[in-house]
Image (cartoon, grey):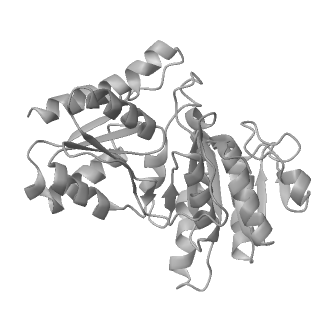
Amino acid sequence: MADVITYREAVAEGIAREMRRDNTIVCLGEDIAEAEGVFKTTVGLLAEFGPKRVWDTPISEQAIVGAAMGAAMTGMRPVAEIMFSDFLACCWDYLANEIPKVRYMTGGQVTVPLVVRTANGGGLGFGAQHSQATENWAFTVPGLKIAAPSTPADVIGLMASAIRSDDPVVFFEHKGLFASKGPAAPPDHVVPLGAANIARTGRDVTVVALASTVPTALAAAELLAGEGIAVEVLDLRCLVPLDMATVLDSVSRTSRLVIVEENPYQGGWGGTVASIVADEGFEFLDAPIRRVAAECVPLPFADRLEDEVIPTVDKVADAVRRLAVF
């Protein structure tokens, strides 16, 4: 295996590793077999595992997730792809009202061990119906776990944990990261769900980020280092479970917090992070908590307008500067 791998290659590699380990794992979705995925994230799966384990489906999100639910309830571990996360709305009854509640309503007698993979987020000019960051949708539903990796190695490690989980997991793969590269994951690499990563250490300001906002935060931290501001960047990696212990520990050392999220400010997951820090770590703070989030508007198609809506390096750096001198 290469020393460096792309994020999109890591998706296929992560799935393949688990399919080799467990023959109850199957994949289903639109164009994932012969076409190897519209984003080329299932390359090689049909060739290696065949049509009995890699299924092309009709263009019906309800059919995909409904079939995955039934398969999971009867002993399989399906990995279902919804091509764009915006289209989770098309199967929302299954995802919000059925799948997360089965284990609870049966007293643990029936589990639904499935993964719903989906391409998430903006930055590529795909327009208002194909560019939304929708983690906050799933975040409102008790019973769903949520993973959103920022690096190829974390894609593989979190995919292993997601597929092995006996609870349903929504796995957000960021479209803007597919071409990014990083170190390949070692054999048997597993990243526990709910364990944040300190992507950069610093003493002055904590910046909490997820998925595509992690490289944005790291770029801002590098810029600010030249100005004498040492930023600590936390990659949450998951929203459920949410590793607030690591966040609170960092804030206890820096006394300042900036949250960077691609969800709209209104109803974004950053509001929950801010609330927990205010409740449990208020005494650590020497400045107000700041959130850098997307504007509450449909995402524009034009790239210059899209940059006005979603978090950018300059927006993050400006927020950190203002907090550092508060």
Residue at 57%, 30% in the rendered image: 129
Q: Is residue 65 above or below residue 25?
A: above
Provide residue 254's location: percent of width, then percent of height.
17, 49
* Left or right of 196 in this view: 111: right
User: Depth check: 51 or 49 in front?
Assistant: 49
* Left or right of 13 in this view: 184: left
Residue at 46%, 53% in the rendered image: 237
Residue 282, quarter of the rendered image: bottom left
Observer able to see residue 286: yes
* Left or right of 89 in this view: 219: left
Disc tally is 0
Q: Is residue 135 above or below residue 158?
A: above
Provide residue 270's location: percent of width, then percent of height.
32, 46
User: Depth check: 111 or 208 in front?
Assistant: 208
Provide residue 49's location: percent of width, then percent of height.
88, 60
Q: Is residue 237 above or below residue 319?
A: below
Provide residue 234's location: percent of width, then percent of height.
35, 49
User: Depth check: 198 or 118 in front?
Assistant: 198
Q: Is residue 72 above or below residue 29?
A: below
Residue 72, quarter of the rendered image: bottom right
Observer able to see residue 92: no
Residue at 28%, 52% in the rendered image: 273
Classify the position of the C terminus by image quarter. Answer: top left
Residue at 46%, 26% in the rendered image: 298
